[in-house]
Image: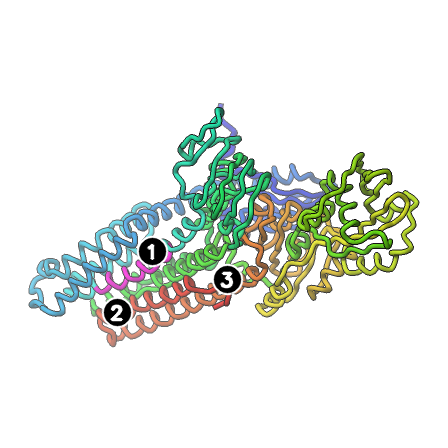
Amino acid sequence: MISTKKPPLMNCEIRHSLPGRVRIYCRGLGYLEEFASVIKQELEDGVAVNSVSLSTISRTILIYFNASEASSDEILDRVTSVLGSWSLSAFKQERAERNAKLLQERRLEEESVGTLAQRIGVTSITLLFAWLRPGPAPQTFLGRFLSMPALTAMGLAWPIVQNGARSLIVQKRPNADTLSSSAILASVAAGQGVSALTIILLADIAELLTAYTMDRTRNAIREMLSLGEEFVWRIDESGHEQKVPLSDLRQGDHVISRTGEKISVDGLVLSGEAAVDQSSITGEYLPVRKITKDEVFAGTVVKSGRLVVEAERVGDRTAIARIINLVEEAAHKKATIQSNADRFSAQLIPINFALAVLVYFITGKFSRALNMLIIDYSCGVRLSTATALSASICTAARNGVLVKGSNYLEALSEADTVVFDKTGTLTEGRPVVSSVICSTRDVVEKDLLCMAAAAEETSNHPMAGAIVERVRRAGWPVPQHSNNEIITARGVTTKIGRPIIRVGSRKFMQESKVNMAAVEEDAQRIARQGENVIYVARGRTLVGIIGVQDVLREDMKKALNRLRNLGMDDIILLTGDVEQHAEIVAARMAMDRYHAEVMPDEKAENVLRIQSKGTSVVMVGDGINDAPALAYSDVGIAMGSTRTDIAMEAADITITGDDPLMIPSVLQLSQKTMNIVRQNFGTAIGVNTLGIMLASVGVLPVFWGAVLHNSCTVAVVLNSSRLLIHDMEKGS
């Protein structure tokens, strides 16, 4: 019996579905870029299909269809059938990319920073010795291979020759190493051992700079996120402290963290008090006081004090582990410009070989043909692009910004529209008491708030929490009370002595026959300011109102102004909040427009509608309700210490702190990165084209051709490395 099981590479699944629209994911689509237009046409020819949008980068297909003629599952079957016919092409491309990745990984293993430094040292000493004590020119062809510079060059070139040959055998095409090894061996055969060493020296310097940047990126992330603890102290069932390996921790274990130690689990504080540095998670560098029932995270540091923590998430389930996984995945997500650079470099390699043959046949000069192999475009373009993108991800990580892939840096640099969620993004996400107005002479602010806190103490509503927190911070005692009752969608009641205390909405007061005339004007005034009005009554007498609002983040307006200066033409507010509050916030922030009372799936619809006008959209949010819009935007940014796990997973960039100025800072970093990449493209192409032209007419000798080409490569890689010292706060 023949198995009908589909290969995992071509499995398709529905990622999101609405009537008449479905988004489908297929991993194999990422390997079918050159056939994308044909696949798109095949899908558009299907029954009931109105339009098809296909992305080989995100590996998704968005299809609009007539819901009365087909279902989402039928569209999925159609997509599976069409892509299945391209499975062989996808497998071939996947294998080629996997082999290329293995070659690259092998090369990186061989060429660590230490190894490259040693190679540079050997090459430099040999060149210095050859220049100080030049020997007689070899008289025979064999003698050219036996001189000290030639032997050193061939020894150092051996890994390059291996990789070049492996590419020809495995991938059936030459790569940059094939070209370099040909140039080095040809130089030695021509008696130009010093030129061969010069090629190796300057190429190794460029590789060293790239490897150093990659190391800096890995180390910055490792230092920022590492738990740094191999053993922890756990309290066993008998109450004794026990030193155990970190890997032995399980959910529910009670773990002790003391001054100077990193907390090893995500969990709740059972006992103790401590000042905790949470900068690795939230970006906030001021220690935060943690007491019983507070939440703590793995990777944060106890600056002073002692905590006993009940583990809720351990190992790979902790917040720090998820962040590490996201950053590690970033290395495999190339920007389009990086893919184009790699593809451009690969396509030019055969041209260099063809130029060498052509120049030799036209001029009959071996040295001119040799220069065609030495002067190539691939090294400078490939190395400088990879260095620039890696350096940017490193710089972002050092500043608490986690970028899931260099492709998102490129997309961010091209964006022209930014959409903000309100609660938790533009605002702090933590309501606070902003106004207190008493309506009777015998009740002062303290009395009013304490009455309200007594009633709200058992409520889990955020606004109730704001009142209780205000009283707690003031150190005021909550009066003795009893018979707390929550009236759904209205408010709460309690008894303080004999009178019933009512706390809640205007409608609740009306239904309770409470006269509100004394505070009517004040209530309307604070409502116009965007505050939520809470009424407090003792018996049937209104004693005052309390205004509660989610305050706007400090520096948010400055962040929006900077975004405009950086080229964001359209700044939009998208919120589930009521129209009145959305209008007030949009006006205060000088936003271009707003959409209020929007459901989560409608947020995604709004993002798609904005994109349909040809704009590139950045979505900034923090919660579960923002996740669909974050996923559908060109770049999704999850921001703030209050962000949810699902928002972080859906987003492409995560800002771990609460500073809104990091949004324009990461935009500026992305723009600077792309500018540097384009500078490097122009420089590498211009300088090497000039070198090829001069070499072809005999003006540029082999040695100086090697110097020109490899010096240009070093220069563009150094230009990319500048991003390591970019100051995101100052933007320089």
User: Is residue 198 positioned above or below 331 on the image?
Assistant: below
Where residue 125 appears, as percent x and y from the top left, is: 16, 62
Residue assigned mark 3:
670
Ranked by sequence position, the earlier of labels 1 and 2 is 1
Look at the image and say whether residue 41 sits in the magenta stretch. no
Say what amino acid the circle numbered 1 marks: Ala
Ranked by sequence position, the earlier of labels 3 and 1 is 1
Residue assigned mark 2:
707
Stretch in magenta: 198-214
Residue in front for this viewpoint, 516 or 578 = 516
Q: Is residue 361 visible?
A: no
Residue assigned mark 1:
211
Ranked by sequence position, the earlier of labels 3 and 2 is 3
Say what amino acid the circle numbered 3 marks: Ser
Residue 475 lies left or right of residue 27; in this view the side is right
Look at the image and say whether residue 211 sits in the magenta stretch. yes
Residue 495 lies left or right of residue 354; in this view the side is right
Of marks 3 and 2, the one in the foreground:
3
Look at the magenta stretch and give its main secondary structure. Answer: helix
Q: Secondary structure at mark 3?
A: helix
User: Residues under labels 3 and 1: Cα distance?
Assistant: 21 Å
Residue in front for this viewpoint, 110 or 624 = 624
Where residue 565 appears, as percent x and y from the top left, is: 59, 70
Q: Secondary structure at mark 2?
A: helix
